[in-house]
Amino acid sequence: MTHAVNPSLLTPYALQTEQRTEPLGTGERHPRLSWRLRSRRRAAAQSAYRITVASHPSDLNTPSRLLWDTGRRTSSDTLLIGWDGPALTSATRYHWRVEVWDETGTRGGSAQSWFETGLLNPDDWTAQWVGRDVVNLPTFDPPEDDDPEGSALQSPPLQLRRAFRATSRPVRARLYATARGVYEPRLNGVRVGDSELSPGWTEYHRRLQYQTYDVTDLITEGPNVLAAIVADGWWSGYVGFDPRRAAQHYGERPALWAQLVLDFADGSRQVVATDPEWTEQPGAIRAADLLMGQTADARRRTPGWDAPGPEPVGFSPVAVLDTAPGPLVAESDDPVRVVQDKPAVSVHHLGDGRYIVDFGQNLVGRVQLTIRGAEPGRRIVLRHAEVLDEGELYLDNLRRAQATDVYVADGTGTEVFEPQFTFHGFRYVEIDHYPGDLAAGDVTARVLHSDTPWTGSFDCSDPTVNQLQSNIAWGQRGNFLAVPTDCPQRDERLGWLADAQIFAPTASRNADVSAFFARWMHDILDGQDSDGAFRDVAPVMTLDREAAPAWGDAGVIIPWHLWRTYGDLHALEGSFDAMAAWVEHIRRHNPDLRWRHRTGNSYGDWLQVGVTTPRDVLSTAYFARSTQVVADAAEILGRSQAAAHYRALHAAIRSAFVESYVHDDGSIEGGTQTGYLLALGFGLLPEALVDAAVGHLAADIEKRNTTLTTGFVGTALLCPVLTDHGRADLAYALLHQEAYPSWGHSIRHGATTIWERWDGWTSEGGFQSAAMNSFNHYSLGSVGDWLFGRVAGIDQTLSSVAYSELLLRPQPGGRLTWARAEQETARGRVACGWSLADGLITVTVTVPPGATARLHLPTSDPAGVREGDAPAAGRPGVLAIESHPAGAALRLASGHYVISAAAPEPTLPVPQ
């Protein structure tokens, strides 16, 4: 809630606790508070703030009832301000308000929010782990040809219930729950909350998240029933490409842990927890698996099982599987949710009750199907695929994942099927054995992903580039599901570290991924071994070995990115020892400082095209990069001795790289685009050889008819390095290229997400090997950071943290006549856009209060720069203006600006 009337008033908004909006059930004893600022006035900035905290919103206006009052603190800080008030108590809601004062000392606006603590102490828990008694362990019906693979080996999901009486309506009711598996809580016949596939996937041996739900409005005086459905999920279902069940990793069967706490007006409390009093019986869901799909038989429904009334027939006592909670932690980021629905764009009838539905977008989620007039026992089968092959689903690339949902009708009239314990990557769904005519309105795709707040947008004058940005965004949506996965459709769906670290800059343009990545970093750290080696994926899989170069380096790069982008010092501090241990691990095994001895995996520049970057070149470059980051982190954290050590080590690795892999003419060993990009992008070359290396890189691109050869690693550096070294013309040429290999090639062939490989499908070769051919894989979408940062121009200086000092470098080029981007940064809204018309370039800029900006304006006439309708020099908020190699450089205070000048000289022509 924000209180302000005057738009010129400095006003806080978007209040967060632990990087989340109004979190219910935080586990932090000293949570950090943040807010953003806005004002239409130029040069607005915060000079002081005051935080007040109370038990009720109305108490914030009564000083004697405040729980914490910072008083007026002289500070410009708005990010992650640590709690230093009284100790927090469990299960308590705290309302807080922030007031701000502007740069003149004038009182600005205020805003308020709240957070609620979870169960902070081990003795707050009385629950026990309950599950199916093995004596009553049923198996799935004998499989038919269209059953999900392995379903005969599964047990139906749990249906658990506990009846209880409430003496009156509570004034407050909270459910604290989690599962070994994935679960859906229910209360008095109603689903609780809107999270999906909770508790998500973490390194369960080390951390299992519990969720907190406000169920006050669902409790009635008298009889009540608390219930839940629990399926295998990541705990005991199929995970990754391991042919064994996940029981090899976590556990053999699912279980529930729940504790319902009712507080009454008279101060009394009632607790209903999982214990031997619960009962269980399988229901309509006969099998559910994240990879294989879900099967439901509506004839086996148990009506009223989750609502007050007589105990349903067939329910048996549960077994108590464990009395210790294990490594429970409060959920620390936003859960997976259904974030939107996509209607069918076409329905094609193939005859005999078989249809193929096209949703027009490759997405991740599930299908909701309405069925009318089916006779009892009719078996309707839904199969999912990303693409078609001659009008039929292309399924080969799913490998062992069946991605098949089955519904057996009960014949009661209109029936609705929506599986809730699986997810699929698909654009198309085949519906077989459907009764009657299937209309487009009968089928809807429900889009699932971790509900990271969407904060960025980019668009421009070129429809193909806009489609590229859309493909990047949809790839992020689909693959940020509990963990940052590599692909959402086949039997993999793992949190590969390199994919995430190269895409993290792009991801944080599109969405606020601060809490998402901070939580996942715990899984990365949990996977580190005693010698300092990270693993390729997080959470760790049984067969996972020591991480490859660029993969393990995510354990260093992601914490640094969280610091630079969001100001998250806690993530950097908590990761630093592990970051340093990774670098020392590499050094111990490679005393000559050339990363040649790799005790684990080594993938090189994965899926590069027609070339092979020497692995020693890539490895040593990343060794240098991680060492540099550790040195920078040590300096930020005040560890001066460590900073000096790693600065010296970085200098020695850089020298070893040049000595071993750089030739006198500036060429790099192997001569690949990625080799040059690593050397240039990581600053490994002597200054005297930089121009020569850029020339070699450009020549390689040009000799290939302006096409790339880069894989996952090189592509992230491709356009930024070219632009930073004066070859934006080539970066734009690659952006607009439509011949294979290119982003445009996939778009020209109908892609709506980023493909895993450049040649996922070609007119000459058809589909690539089904062994590895995802059509939704964000890695090659790492170019999105360049679209925001150099095409539109939003970036920050090297010394800036959380966009405190913007570096705005709009770069016209290619076929574009305009481009623009917006970002809700940790400090507030940033925007930069440009247009070319009538011989002028016009740049629009928004700088949030408290930040400043350096604008590099490309113009052929630096002296003719105007702001609004007057010369820019001396205008309010324009702090300085001077010549710059780009044309002109302006230093701007916060505010909104429209700046124009003579257009720059055109870049070189782009292939059409």
Image (cartoon, rainbow, N blue to C red):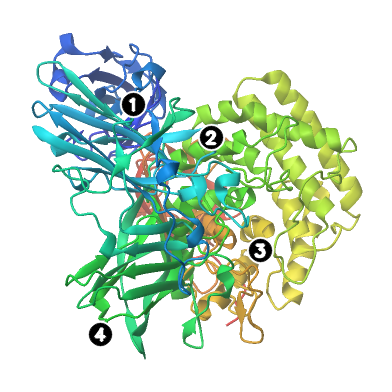
Q: Which secondary structure lies at badge 3? A: loop
* Residue occupying the far bottom of the picture: 351
- Please give the residue where the numbered disc 3 appears in the rendered image: 727
What is the tally of numbered marks visible in this picture?
A: 4
Locate residue 103, reporting x and y percent. 33, 26
Of labels 2 and 3, earlier in sequence is: 2
Other residues around mark 2 within 10 Å, as few (<14) / some (14–19) / many (≥20): many
Q: Is residue 583 left or right of residue 784?
A: right
Q: Is residue 724 left or right of residue 193?
A: right
- Please give the residue where the numbered disc 2 appears in the rendered image: 563
Q: Which secondary structure lies at badge 2? A: helix
Asked if labels 4 and 2 touch by Cβ distance under 8 angstroms, the answer is no
Residue depicted at x 39% and y 72%: 382
User: Whole-Å distance between the Cαs marked 3 and 1?
Assistant: 53 Å
Of labels 2 and 1, earlier in sequence is: 1
Question: Label 4 is placed on what type of residue?
Answer: Asp
Q: 375 or 48, which lies in front?
A: 375
Other residues around mark 3 within 10 Å, as few (<14) / some (14–19) / many (≥20): some
Question: Label 2 is placed on what type of residue?
Answer: Trp
| 448 shown above or below 112 | below
Of labels 2 and 4, earlier in sequence is: 4
User: Whole-Å distance between the Cαs marked 4 and 3?
Assistant: 57 Å
Mark toward the viewer: 4 or 3: 4
Residue depicted at x 66% and y 63%: 727
* Residue occupying the far top of the picture: 64
Question: Label 1 is placed on what type of residue?
Answer: Gly
Other residues around mark 1 within 10 Å, as few (<14) / some (14–19) / many (≥20): many
Locate residue 467, reporting x and y percent. 45, 70
Q: Which mark is residue 118?
A: 1
User: Whole-Å distance between the Cαs marked 2 and 1?
Assistant: 26 Å
User: Residue 570, can we see it?
Assistant: yes
| 332 shown above or below 92 | below
